[in-house]
Amino acid sequence: MPTHEVARALALREAHTIYSDYLEEQGVTYVPLAGAVDAAEAVLAGEVDAVLVDHGYAVAKLAEHEGRLEAVGPRLRLDRGLG
């Protein structure tokens, strides 16, 4: 069982992706963000509690925001990528 509470609003950078398919299979409700909206900025602005993003994007944003963001939960292999 995860040690973190379920986020009240989970966001994805885009709908109709492998990430959205995974969340739908798990029965998780999510808020799709428009492609131009930065997922990290949506979290920092309080628009959403969490995002499910590509591992490479997450690593870059964690470094860019120097401690203001935190990776939680396990890494997930979706198709051929790592989220």
Image (tube, rainbow, N blue to C red):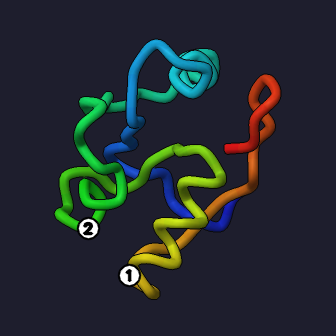
Mark with earlier residue (1, 2): 2
Residue at x 49% of width, y 28% of height: 28
Residue 66's spot in the image, x, y percent?
A: 44, 86
**Mark 1: few, some, or many residues within 10 Å (few <14, many ≥20)?**
few
Residue at x 51% of width, y 22% of height: 20
Quadrant containing the N terminus is bottom right
Image-based side of 14 in relation to 58, left or right: left
Q: How many marks?
A: 2
Residue at x 54% of width, y 54% of height: 57
Q: Which residue is mark 1?
A: 68
Quarter of the image for residue 15 reads: top left
**Mark 2: few, some, or many residues within 10 Å (few <14, many ≥20)?**
some
Q: Are marks 1 and 2 in contact (CB under 8 Å)?
A: yes
Q: Farthest bottom residue? A: 67
Q: Which mark is residue 47?
A: none
Under circle 1, the secondary element is loop
Q: Is residue 82 above or below residue 21?
A: below
Of residues 25 and 61, the one drawn nearer to the viewer in this rendering: 61
Residue at x 65% of width, y 67% of height: 3
| Residues at marks 1 and 2, CA–CA distance in whole angstroms | 8 Å
Q: Is residue 23 above or below residue 63?
A: above
Quarter of the image for residue 21 reads: top right
Q: Amino acid at mark 2?
A: Leu
Of residues 65 and 44, the one drawn nearer to the viewer in this rendering: 65
Residue 49's spot in the image, x, y percent?
A: 34, 56
Q: Amino acid at mark 1?
A: Arg
Image-based side of 18 in relation to 1, left or right: left
Q: Which residue is mark 2?
A: 44
Q: Is residue 66 above or below residue 83?
A: below
Residue 77's spot in the image, x, y percent?
A: 80, 37
